[in-house]
Image: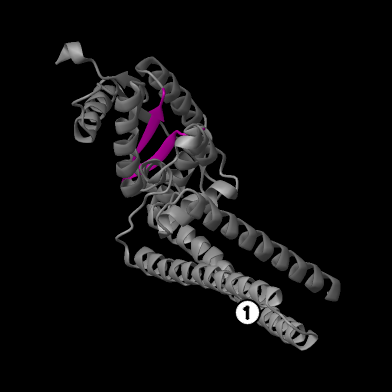
Amino acid sequence: MAQEFVKSRENDNASAAKAQEIAVKALERIEELDLSPTPENFELWYKYFDGDAELVGAIDKFGDKVNEAVCDKVYRRFLQSSSHEDAIRKVSDELQQALAEIAGLFKSVKSATNEYGDTLDGASVKIQNANSLDDLSEVVSEMVQSTKKVVEYNKSLESQLSNSTQQMAELRQNLDTVRKEAMTDSLTGLSNRKAFDNYLELAMAEAAEQKSTLVLLMMDIDHFKKFNDTYGHLIGDQVLRLVARSLKDGIKGRDLAARYGGEEFAIILPDTNVQGGVSVGNALRRVVERKEVINRTTNENLGQITLSVGVTEFFGQGDTPEKMIARADEALYDAKQAGRNRVKAYDPAAV
């Protein structure tokens, strides 16, 4: 038991040391690039040095052209969330205060270094003008006192800096937790409607800028209301979680799966054309179709569930999230009208 406790403490200390090291690197990069010491920039670079692969790739592609605008763009794409939420704002304010304290510490270090430099310059002049051993002894004594003072001061600053960077690392982790909770559907664990709205807007802006493809899938569990009414909400929740798990396992990379509302789900597929979207929709539909719903209390097999899917692609400049969702919904309606458990793509020619 004692060994396990010691090992746990060692792991905690190692984690704290790593978090502090990452926090220092983030601060140094912010200063190096002459960026504003904001919570957003700190979180961005903390994630970068923590090894977030997608974020690292997004930043590194700009090479030595990383500036405030680039950081803002990458932050909005990967980390932006409902910052107006009270909980997020509270942690953000605390992070801003910690950043201000560290900025003050850096200024103190710079001031102390300059002061010590002035002391050394003055000592050099006094040595040159010394006329006796007593004069030299006095100069050496002053230098010893100044050196002792600056060493003690630097130890104090090092301790304060260590505490502040550790506090910032903890605040960043808190902010990350709060953000995930604010952007996650509590029942299914998928992104919620707010996260979906944010990501779709950003994905469309990026597709327009890079002239790349983008696909949206809207999907609905067939006859879910009847299923829910027959077997109850607990079984209905089990079905929602089963579908959500299937969707999450069936996407990759920058794809995003979200619970749009009720029994309706949505998937955003960057760098994918409409044919690819239809293929993904069919693959996910077949995976769900093969699942069987089991009543965990009675072990009764309640049968299979199916999905209807509507697909639309990004139409380029002038397209909007509202229009894209409406087109996907129209295709979803067509899938239901055609018999359900199928995928339909939006057909502009049919309008």
Give 222 or 299, whichever is nearer the viewer: 222
| 120 lies above or below 25 | below
Image quadrant occupied by the N terminus: bottom right
Q: Quadrant of residue 159?
A: bottom right
Q: Residue furthest left?
A: 351
Is 22 on the left-hand or right-hand side of 87? right
Give 66 or 302, whichever is nearer the viewer: 66
The x and y percentages for residue 81 are 36, 52
Residue under label 1: 153
The x and y percentages for residue 141 are 73, 85
Q: Residue at x 48, y 53 (%)?
A: 30
Is 143 on the left-hand or right-hand side of 70? right
- Residue 349 magenta-drawn? no
Give 40 or 220, whichever is nearer the viewer: 40
- Residue 260 magenta-drawn? yes
| 213 lies above or below 82 | above
Report if residue 233 is visible in the image: yes
Magenta stretch: give its range. 253-271
Q: Residue at x 85, y 71 (%)?
A: 3
Q: Quadrant of residue 165?
A: bottom right
| 347 lies above or below 291 | above
Q: Residue at x 50, y 29 (%)?
A: 287
Report if residue 303 is visible in the image: no
The x and y percentages for residue 161 are 58, 71
The kind of residue tagged 1 is: Tyr
Looking at the rendered structure, the secondary structure element under dot 1 is: helix
